[in-house]
Image (cartoon, rainbow, N blue to C red):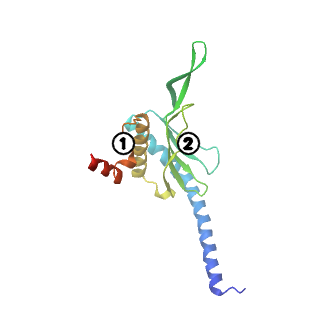
Amino acid sequence: MTFTEQDYQNFQRKVERYQEILKNTAQYRARWHDSLKKELLELLQKAVDSANLTCTVEERSEIKNLEAVVLTLGSTKSGLGEPVGEGLHRDLIKQNGSLVYQQLFNGKILVLINYPYIEKYGQPQPPKTLAIYRPEEIKEPYVIRHLEGFITEVTEWEDYDDDRPDENQRIGFKLNFEQDGQ
């Protein structure tokens, strides 16, 4: 088997791309530590203060370079309780949801919503990924949009109602057929 000069050039380009990605990871991590983390903490706090939203904005840094900035609505009594003995009930705790800016292994930032859930009452919904950004891509208008999306999602969770039509049935053949056939 003989490799051509073209084969070596193709391989060299792939190695250069790999090295560029590794360099980007180091730059993204530096940007997070140098400024982005602080900017996110300040932007989120400014927004929730202006809207008078009761929540906590905090940094989570258990693992270096997998840190996060989290806006959490905290935990509360759900209003539900389970019996634990004669006349005694244990309150079930509700996690009220959170908006997370999480560093990924490659220094990019994952933005996601953790939905509210009540312990022992079904399974928590999986988080909703909003986007993955390079640190320089995160700007104030995006953060505001993320906050709006977060509040919309937790509001819809709190206002759950099975009377609403299924999102997948609002348009399409089945809905049109049923209306035409009535």
Taking 97 as reference, is 81 above or below it?
Answer: above
| Residue beneath the point at 39% across and 49% down | 168
Residue 172 appears in view? no
Is label 2 in contact with label 1 (beta carbons under 8 Å)? no
Q: Nearer the viewer, residue 75 or 139?
A: 75
Quarter of the image that includes the C terminus: top left
**Can you tell which quarter of the image residue 85 is in?**
top right
- Label annotation for residue 66: none
Kind of residue at badge 2: Glu
Q: Is residue 93 left or right of residue 172?
A: right
The quarter of the displayed image where residue 51 is located: top left
Q: Residue furthest top?
A: 86
Q: Amino acid at mark 1?
A: Pro
154 relative to 109, above or below = above
| Label 2: element kind | strand
Q: Residue furthest right?
A: 1
Q: Residue at x 47, y 34 (%)?
A: 55
Q: Which mark is residue 165?
A: 1
Which residue is at 44% across, 32% downward? 54
Measure the C-alpha gap from mark 2 to mark 1: 39 Å
Examine the rendered structure and indicate whether residue 180 appears above or below residue 1.
above
Q: Residue furthest front?
A: 181
| Left or right of residue 121: residue 146 | left
Q: Is residue 173 visible?
A: yes
- Left of 118 or right of it: where is 48? left
| Front of the two marks 2 and 1 | 1
User: Which mark, by number, is residue 59?
Assistant: 2
Circle 1 crowding by C-alpha within 10 Å: few under 14, some 14–19, many from 20:
few
The disc, 2 or 1, on the residue closer to the chain's N-terminal end is 2
Q: Give above or below for 147 relative to 109.
A: above
Q: Which type of secondary structure does the marked residue at label 1 adopt?
A: loop
The image shows residue 57 at horizontal and vertical percentages of: 50, 39
